[in-house]
Image: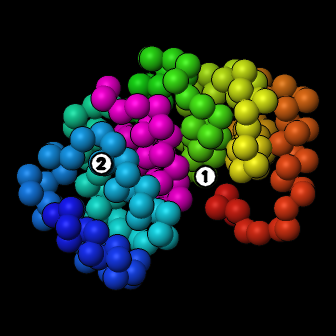
């Protein structure tokens, strides 16, 4: 299956949809956490719609639990579902519960930004996870890469204007940094629109 996946990717992103998830030997149950996360991330990054695959990954992740997912795998999975505009309430609840249960010490600044952005895009209102992400973002402020503050700014707009939870906003200096990073870019459509 890995060879067919590689060949399809080499042939161009238009061929990715031809790889049904259930045709992998053993189905998605044979995938480890990293392989599940990387699969949905690759489809989302290539901007290939694969609703059946994404749903199958959500089902598999929910079935097995997310205990074996590393921080990056949790964040990348959340990002991929948001990028694919594929709501998966049970999966996001599991991601939120797992992240809050273990704490966010393993999350780097990009993991936090991806997670917050994904929650905003799919309107996943989990106050415990958002509060933990807000705290962790402040701890990692110095390590934010250019995309991170833009994602965090979009999440802040959602928290403030859609969810109306000012208690979950970043501290004003970090919010200003995020707003400034967003305004420095040429305008482009947001997934939140």
Q: Name the front one of labels 1 and 2.
A: 2
Q: Which mark is residue 79?
A: none
Query: For the C terminus, which image quadrant?
Result: bottom right
**Residue at mark 2:** 35
Q: Position of residue 189 (x, y in %)?
A: 73, 68
Secondary structure at numbered mark 1:
helix
Q: Which residues are magenta?
A: 67-92
| SS majority, magenta | helix
Asked if residue 120 can be seen in this view, the reply is no
Q: Position of residue 27 (x, y in %)?
A: 13, 54
For the residues marked 1 and 2, what is the alpha-carbon distance in whole angstroms? 24 Å
Single out the residue that lies furthest toward the left: 26
Query: Which residue shows up at 49% across the image and 70% down it?
Result: 47
Q: Which is more N-terminal, label 2 or label 1? A: 2
Q: Which mark is residue 121?
A: 1
Identify the image's colour scheme: rainbow, by chain, secondary structure or one colour. rainbow
- Does the magenta-highlighted stretch encompass residue 178? no
Secondary structure at numbered mark 2:
helix
Q: Position of residue 183 (x, y in %)?
A: 89, 56
Q: Is residue 99 above or below residue 34?
A: above
Please name whichever residue, 11 or 188, is drawn nearer the observer in this view of the structure: 11
Quarter-of-image position of residue 158: top right
Query: Which residue shows up at 27% across the image and 75% down it?
Result: 7
Q: Is residue 152 above or below residue 185?
A: above
Asked if residue 174 can be seen in this view, the reply is yes
Q: Looking at the image, how many numbered discs can be counted on the residues?
A: 2
Q: Is residue 8 left or right of residue 162?
A: left
């Amino acid at each position: 299956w890995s060879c067919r996946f590689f060949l399809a990717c080499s042939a161009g992103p238009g061929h990715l949809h031809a790889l049904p998830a259930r045709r992998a030997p053993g189905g998605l149950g044979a995938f480890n956490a990293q392989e599940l996360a990387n699969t949905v991330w690759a489809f989302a990054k290539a901007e290939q719609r694969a609703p059946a695959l994404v749903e199958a990954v959500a089902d598999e992740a929910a079935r097995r639990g997310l205990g074996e997912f590393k921080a990056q795998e949790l964040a990348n999975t959340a990002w991929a579902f948001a990028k694919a505009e594929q709501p998966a309430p049970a999966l996001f609840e599991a991601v939120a519960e797992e992240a809050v249960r273990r704490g966010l010490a393993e999350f780097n600044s990009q993991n936090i930004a991806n997670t917050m952005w994904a929650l905003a895009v799919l309107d996943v209102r989990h106050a415990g996870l958002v509060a933990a992400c807000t705290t962790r973002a402040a701890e990692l402020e110095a390590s934010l890469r250019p995309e991170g503050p833009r994602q965090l700014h979009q999440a802040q707009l959602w928290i403030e204007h859609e969810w109306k939870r000012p208690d979950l906003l970043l501290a004003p200096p970090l919010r200003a940094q995020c707003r400034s990073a967003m305004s420095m870019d040429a305008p482009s459509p947001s997934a939140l629109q």
